[in-house]
């Protein structure tokens, strides 16, 4: 396991972010990028739920153009 600790100064004090991975070969940049991508997914889930769409199901055909 690899642990990455990032601290940020805030008006309310110092905030620590703890990121970890079970893949010790990842660089710090790769760990942070994976976290950013995962956080975008979490925000999407939050927004879908806020819109009341969590019970809806939909799929996207990967062959169709964007």
Image (cartoon, rainbow, N blue to C red):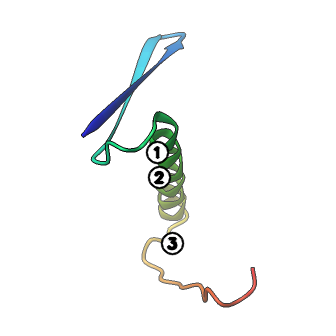
Q: Residues within 10 Å of mark 3 (few under 14, many from 20)?
A: few
Q: Residue at x 44, y 12 (%)?
A: 14
> Residue 18, relative to residue 49: is it above or below?
above
> Residue 23, relative to residue 15: is it above or below?
below
Name the spot of residue 30 as percent of width and height, x first.
Answer: 49, 43
Between the residue at mark 2 and the residue at mark 3, the CA separation in whole angstroms equals 20 Å
* Secondary element at image label 1: helix
* Secondary element at image label 3: loop
Between the residue at mark 3 and the residue at mark 1, the CA separation in whole angstroms equals 25 Å
Q: Nearer the viewer, mark 3 or mark 1?
A: 1
Q: Residue at x 47, y 52 (%)?
A: 38
Which residue is under mark 1?
Answer: 35
> Residue 17, relative to residue 55: is it above or below?
above
In the rendered structure, the answer to whether residue 1 lies left or right of residue 44 reads left
Which of the two labelled residues, at mark 2 and mark 3, occupies the earlier sequence position? 2
Which residue is under mark 2?
Answer: 38
Residues 40 and 25: in front is 25
């Amino acid at each position: 396991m690899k642990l990455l600790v990032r601290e940020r100064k805030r008006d309310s004090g110092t905030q620590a972010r703890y990121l970890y991975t079970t893949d010790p070969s990842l660089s710090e940049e790769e760990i942070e990028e994976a976290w950013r991508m995962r956080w975008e997914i979490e925000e999407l889930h939050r927004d879908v739920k806020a819109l009341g769409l969590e019970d809806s199901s939909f799929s996207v055909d990967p062959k169709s153009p964007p």
